[in-house]
Image (spheres, helix red, strand yellow):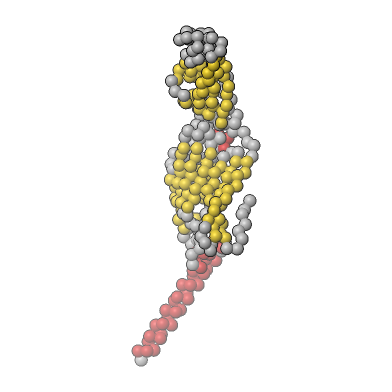
Amino acid sequence: MLPEAPDGVTIKGGNITQNAQSTRQEWIVTDTATGVSRTYSLTVTRPVKTAVTEFKPADPAKQDSTVDPESQQDTNLASHGYTGKDGKYVVSDKGSYEIPEGGTFAYEPKNGQSATVTVAHEGMTYTYTVNVLAPDGSTFAQHTYTVTYITAATHKAQLTGILVDGTAVKGFDPARHEYNASVNDPDEWMVSPQYDKASGMTVSTEKKGADATITVTSGDGLVKTTYKVHVTRKPFGGNGNNALGLASTGVGGGTVAFLSMALMAMGAVLGLVARRRQRGRSF
């Protein structure tokens, strides 16, 4: 989908944010008479399964009560945290924390308390509300904890490649974060980050002139990696003079060579004529 500009208006492509489920494209629209600009955006969504959408933690693990309440009105939990994949209960003293792969949220009520849990989540971040009824049967309180689940796939934030005008950059390495490339026109070029869409990561691209900054965010939102691309004009390419422009108009290499030879021959002829004229003036 491409925007259409009326007379007196210019449109320039802006930032792009994409993941497996959506792509958001911005356009910067400028009134050429006043210089006033406005940014429009369009988001296209599609239902796609990823490691984030398919993740389902185990139910909250209620631990056996081992602590007596301080009073019959006590609504404080004995503890909360998570059980690891080995089943060991790990206590946390924070309201927000991370749970390693294979773990699940856990809590321990005190003796005589009744406790239930409600769950809400966005992405890999889960909010657990523990509803506690005190031993007196009437005093009630809620405790809310926010946890982010960690998995290998959803904690990853790296590209698998970068295309510049449809061509892969040379020597790409996910651990290397800066690249240079040559294009026909540094003012009109396209960068396409390649990444593992199934992991649920998000990729944002900001391009300004000959420079592009690509920010990769892991599916759990905890890891960010930045890649930078700088482009320069190709020799014999782009919007330079006529000779430099031949490459971008589809003129073949043989034609370029022929024209170069013709120009050299013309130069030799002009030089010979100039020398003859000089001799004529010396007689």
* Residue drawn where x is 57% and y is 60% of the image: 9
Q: Residue furthest bottom?
A: 283
Judge whether 206 appears above or below 240 on screen. above
Q: Of 36 and 208, which appears nearest the observer?
A: 36
Query: Where residue 167 sits: x, y (%)?
Result: 53, 50
* Residue drawn where x is 58% and y is 35% of the image: 198
Query: Where residue 87 sits: x, y (%)?
Result: 51, 15
Q: Of 160 and 271, which appears nearest the observer?
A: 160
Q: Residue furthest left?
A: 282
Left or right: residue 24 versus residue 207 is: right
Q: Of 215 and 197, which appears nearest the observer?
A: 215
Query: Would residue 170 be visible to someone looking at this image?
Result: no
Judge whether 264 appears above or below 120 on screen. below
* Residue drawn where x is 43% and y is 20% of the image: 93
Query: Would residue 279 be visible to someone looking at this image?
Result: yes
Judge whether 66 appears above or below 85 on screen. above
* Residue drawn where x is 58% and y is 22% of the image: 118
Query: Where residue 18 sits: x, y (%)?
Result: 56, 42
Query: Where residue 188 sits: x, y (%)?
Result: 52, 56
Residue 128 position by quadrant: top right
Point out the image quarter for the C terminus: bottom left
